[in-house]
Image (cartoon, grey):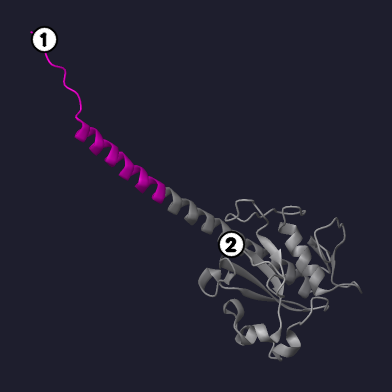
Amino acid sequence: MKKMQKGFSLVELLVVVAIIGVLAGVGIVGYSSYTDSAKKRVSLANFNSVKRFVETELTLLNNNIQTTSGAINSFLTSCTLSVTKYDSTSSTKDLGKFLNGTVCYFDTTGYGNVFKNPFSPAGVSQVVYNQLVVAADATPIKGTINIAYLIAADVSAGRSGISAASITDGTSPTVDHVAVDDDTKGWFIIEYYTADGVRGTAGEEKGKMFELK
């Protein structure tokens, strides 16, 4: 007498398929959450690195420890080839060259440490220059680090969480903050975008003011 071979029933197979589908769904969600968290950690780490880099350069230049930057080249409008370091004693110095030179240091086509935006599939540069100043500017995407000059209205509006109390020299913001980027000195901001076109305003995402004297 032949023994009957037993197999899985259709119901059992459907249950197994359903369980696999649930586990796969949970895994995908968990992986997506993990990658988003990793991208945020990297982009904020880059944000802090840029701030520390600029702070170091300004400490040396503003206190005459050195008159020529050891790292920042003097760029005017784009990251085209330049071998001239920013010189605080030059008659042609201006804030725009210092800021754009800093951006070019981190640019994908630049000459220093390349910082790509982790949230950009195309791998665009994370550090940009003076965005959202005029209507024609492109909206910075999530993770963008924007280095921009300031005007008094920016301080009054609390741009990126800053305030007039951030100014420590006691003079008027109208005097201290530049309205154009060809001034020889002035205040500027380094800010982080938490979402497309949205600036961070608190905690480690808050913008920070700096002064080139």
Say whether residue 124 is left or right of residue 204. right
Quadrant holding the N terminus: top left
Secondary structure that dominates the magenta span: helix
Extreme residue in the right direction: 91
Residue drawn 85% across and 55% down? 81
Q: Horizontal and vertical percent for residue 87?
A: 86, 68
**Label ID, residue 109:** none
Amino acid bearing label 2: Gly
Question: In the rendered structure, are the residues bearing label 1 and label 2 in contact, judged by CB atoms less than 8 Å apart?
Answer: no
Quadrant in which residue 52 is drawn: bottom right
Residue that mark 1 sits on: 2
Q: Is residue 191 above or below residue 171?
A: above
Residue drawn 51% across and 72% down? 203
Residue drawn 60% across and 73% down? 207
Q: Secondary structure at mark 1?
A: loop
| Mark 2 surroundings within 10 Å by alpha-carbon count, few (fewer than 14), some (14 through 19), many (20 or more) | many
Residue drawn 70% across and 64% down? 128
Q: Earlier in the sequence, mark 1 or mark 2?
A: 1
Q: Horizontal and vertical percent for residue 123?
A: 64, 51
Say whether residue 51 is left or right of residue 11. right
Q: Is residue 179 above or below residue 80?
A: below
Q: Is residue 47 visible?
A: yes
Residue that mark 2 sits on: 143
Q: Does 10 appear in magenta?
A: yes
Say whether residue 38 is left or right of residue 64. left
Residue sitting nearer the eye, 202 or 196: 196
Amino acid bearing label 1: Lys
Q: Which residues are magenta?
A: 1-30
- Front position among marks 1 and 2: 1
Q: Is residue 145 above or below residue 25?
A: below
Q: Does 25 appear in magenta?
A: yes
